[in-house]
Amino acid sequence: MDLVSALAELRENSIVTGFPCSVNTVWKTLNDKERQALETVFADSKVSTTSLYELLIANKYKVGKASLYKHRAKKCRCFR
Ligand SMILES: [Zn+2]
């Protein structure tokens, strides 16, 4: 396969619009109280995203570290 076709195929396979990121997927499984607590932590600049990530993973929530950073900064696909 030539480069042009390979790049076109890569783009085609990369379309993910409409799908929430892993943070949003976890978000949907939380109850109101948990959501509120998580939102408070997101808004609290004292809490590092890395420590939040470690806490979520330790509690068996499957989030990606990059997704968590992007979601917190509202730069993931949930906010587009
Ligand atoms: Zn997101």
Image (tube, rainbow, N blue to C red):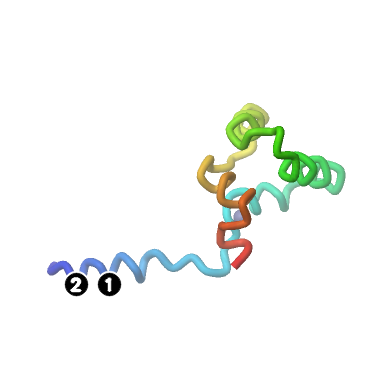
Q: Do the residues labelled 1 and 2 touch (CB within 8 Å)?
A: yes
Residue in view at x 58 percent, y 42 percent: 63
Residues at marks 1 and 2, CA–CA distance in whole angstroms: 6 Å
Judge whether 17 appears above or below 52 on screen. Answer: below
Furthest residue in direction front, as rendered: 45
Relative to 30, 21 lies left or right: left
Q: What residue type is labelled 1?
A: Ala
Label 1 sits on residue: 8
| Other-residue count near label 2 (Cα within 10 Å), few / some / many at <14 / 14–19 / ≥20 | few
| Residue at left offset 48%, top offset 65% | 16
Q: What crowding class fits label 1: few (fewer than 14 Cα within 10 Å), some (14-19), or many (20 or more)?
A: few
Q: In which quarter of the image is the N terminus?
A: bottom left
The location of residue 26, given as percent across then percent down, is 67, 47
Q: Quarter of the image for the C terminus: give it.
A: bottom right
In the rendered structure, find residue 72 and report the number of the disc placed on it: none
Indicate left or right for 53 with 33 as reference: left
Taking the view exactly as shown, the residue that stands out farthest to the top is 58
Q: What amino acid is labelled 2 in the image?
A: Val
- Residue under the image location 86 percent in, 43 percent down: 33
Against 45, residue 54 (above or below) is above
Residue 19: x, y in percent? Answer: 57, 63
**Image disc number at residue 4:** 2
Question: In the picture provided, is 43 more to the left or to the right than 55?
Answer: right
Side (left or right) of 5 relative to 25: left
Q: Which residue is drawn at 25% across and 67% down?
A: 7
Q: Ligand 1 appears in which quadrant?
A: bottom right
Residue 67 on image: x %, y % = 54, 48
